[in-house]
Image: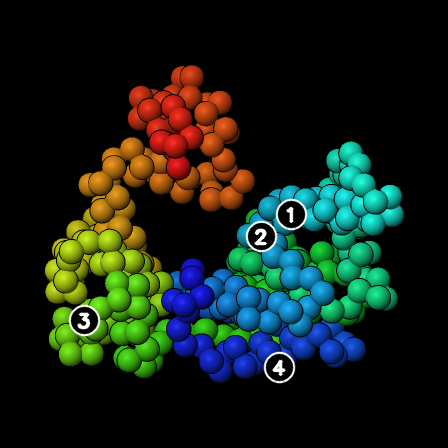
C-alpha cells in the first residue's frame, strides 16, 4: 500500500527498529506473527521502506512454501552472480541457470561473507512451518535457508507465534476506535468522526485492519456512504452465514464478506475483470504476466480470449 495509507503500529515498529539493528555483531531474527488480515506483510514493508538506508541490501522473499522460496533463491543467486560478473569484467555476461541446491548454497555463502553483514532478509508468509512442536505434512523448516554464519538481520512474517528461534512481534486487532476509523476513512478521504454510520462500521469490523482497509477502498471507488456499505455488508454476512459452515471463524467471515463485496463491485463494472481475478486467485498473484496468459488463449473461454486480445485491454 501507499506509505501515506499506513497507520498505527508505532510500538511494533519501535521493536523492529531495536531488534533488527545492523550494527550488532550477532544475527538478528525477528518474527511478525498474527492471524490473517492483521497487516504482517504491510508492517514488514513499512519498516523496510523506512529503514532501507541502514542496510547494505534489503531482500524480500516469498516463503509461503518451500517451492516458492527455492525459486526465489534461484532468482537471487542469478542476480548475485550477474553483479559479481559485472564488477569483475565491467560488462554483462550470459549467466547459466543454476540448479536449486547450487543457488541456495551460493546465496547462503554470499550472506555469510565477512564483509557482508548489514543486509536485511525478509521471509514473507512463512505460514506452513515444520518445526519442533509444529507438525505439518506440507510444511518445511526455514532455517536451512539462513546463512552459514550467524550474522545479518532476518525478518519473518508468519501466522504462527511459536517460532522459538526468533524474537516475536505479535499483531492483534486494533483496540482503539479512532485508529480503526482512521484506517477506514483514509482511502476515501472522508471525515468520519461525526459520522455515526462510520463508527458503527468500524465497531462492526472489530478492529480487523484488512477488513477496514478493504471497506475503505470500496467506498473510495463508489458514491456509497458508510451507512450504505454497512447495509450491504450485513446482507453479505447473512448470505454467508446461511451458505457456509457455521464453524467459520468470525474474523475470516468478516474478511470474506468485505472481499466479496469488492469482487461484486468489480463484476458490476467489468465482468471479465472479475473472472480474471478469480483465475489469478486460483493460480497465485506472482510470476504472472500478459504474454503467459496470451499463449493460453487458443482454447480458452470467450471472456479469456477477449481480455487477452491486447495488452491494453489486459492491463
Please name which of the two marks, 3 or 2, marks the residue nearer to the observer: 3
Residue bearing the label numbered 4: 18
x and y, in percent, of residue 132 in the image: 64, 65
- Left or right of residue 145: residue 188: left
304 vs 186: above or below = above
Which one is nearer the viewer's eye here, 92 or 197? 92
Residue bearing the label numbered 1: 72
Residue bearing the label numbered 2: 62
Judge the density around disc 2: few (<14), some (14-19), many (≥20) Cα neighbours within 10 Å: some
* Labels 1 & 4 near each other (Cβ < 8 A): no
Element carrying mark 3: helix
Element carrying mark 1: helix
What's the residue at 39%, 63% (across, down)?
A: 37
* Labels 2 & 1 near each other (Cβ < 8 A): yes
x and y, in percent, of residue 156 in the image: 59, 65
The quadrant the N terminus occupies is: bottom left
What's the residue at 82%, 56% (across, down)?
A: 109
3 vs 101: above or below = below
* Labels 3 & 2 near each other (Cβ < 8 A): no
Judge the density around disc 4: few (<14), some (14-19), many (≥20) Cα neighbours within 10 Å: few
Residue bearing the label numbered 3: 198
In three-dimensional space, the C-alpha distance between marks 3 and 2, rounded to whole angstroms, equals 36 Å
The quadrant the C terminus occupies is: top left
Instruction: Write down the quadrant of residue 135 in the picture.
Output: bottom right
- Residue 95 visible? The answer is yes
Amino acid at each position: 500500500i501507499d506509505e501515506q495509507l499506513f497507520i498505527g503500529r508505532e510500538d511494533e515498529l519501535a521493536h523492529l527498529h531495536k531488534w533488527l539493528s545492523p550494527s550488532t555483531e550477532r544475527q538478528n531474527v525477528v518474527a511478525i506473527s498474527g492471524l490473517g488480515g492483521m497487516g504482517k506483510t504491510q508492517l514488514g514493508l513499512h519498516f523496510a521502506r523506512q529503514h532501507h538506508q541502514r542496510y547494505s541490501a534489503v531482500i524480500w522473499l516469498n516463503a509461503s512454501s518451500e517451492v516458492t522460496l527455492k525459486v526465489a533463491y534461484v532468482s537471487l543467486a542469478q542476480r548475485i552472480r550477474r553483479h559479481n560478473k559485472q564488477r569483475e569484467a565491467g560488462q554483462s555476461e550470459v549467466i547459466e541457470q543454476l540448479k536449486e541446491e547450487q543457488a541456495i548454497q551460493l546465496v547462503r555463502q554470499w550472506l555469510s561473507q565477512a564483509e557482508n553483514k548489514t543486509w536485511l532478509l525478509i521471509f514473507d508468509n512463512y505460514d506452513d512451518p515444520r518445526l519442533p512442536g509444529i507438525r505439518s505434512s506440507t510444511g518445511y523448516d526455514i532455517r536451512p535457508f539462513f546463512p552459514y554464519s550467524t550474522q545479518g538481520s532476518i525478518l519473518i512474517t508468519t501466522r504462527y507465534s511459536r517460532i522459538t528461534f526468533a524474537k516475536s512481534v505479535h499483531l492483534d486487532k486494533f483496540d482503539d476506535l479512532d485508529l480503526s476509523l482512521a484506517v477506514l476513512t483514509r482511502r476515501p478521504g472522508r471525515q468520519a468522526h461525526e459520522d455515526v454510520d462510520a463508527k458503527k462500521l468500524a465497531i462492526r469490523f472489530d478492529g480487523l485492519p484488512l477488513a477496514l482497509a478493504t471497506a475503505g477502498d470500496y467506498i473510495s471507488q463508489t458514491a456509497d456512504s458508510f451507512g450504505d456499505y454497512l447495509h450491504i455488508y450485513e446482507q453479505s454476512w447473512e448470505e454467508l452465514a446461511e451458505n457456509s459452515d457455521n464453524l467459520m471463524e468470525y474474523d475470516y467471515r468478516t474478511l470474506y464478506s468485505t472481499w466479496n463485496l469488492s469482487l461484486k463491485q468489480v463484476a458490476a463494472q467489468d465482468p471479465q475483470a472479475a473472472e480474471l481475478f478469480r483465475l489469478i486467485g486460483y493460480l497465485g498473484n506472482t510470476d504472472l504476466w500478459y504474454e503467459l496468459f496470451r499463449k493460453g488463449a487458443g482454447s480458452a473461454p470467450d471472456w479469456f480470449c477477449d481480455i487477452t486480445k491486447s495488452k491494453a485491454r489486459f492491463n
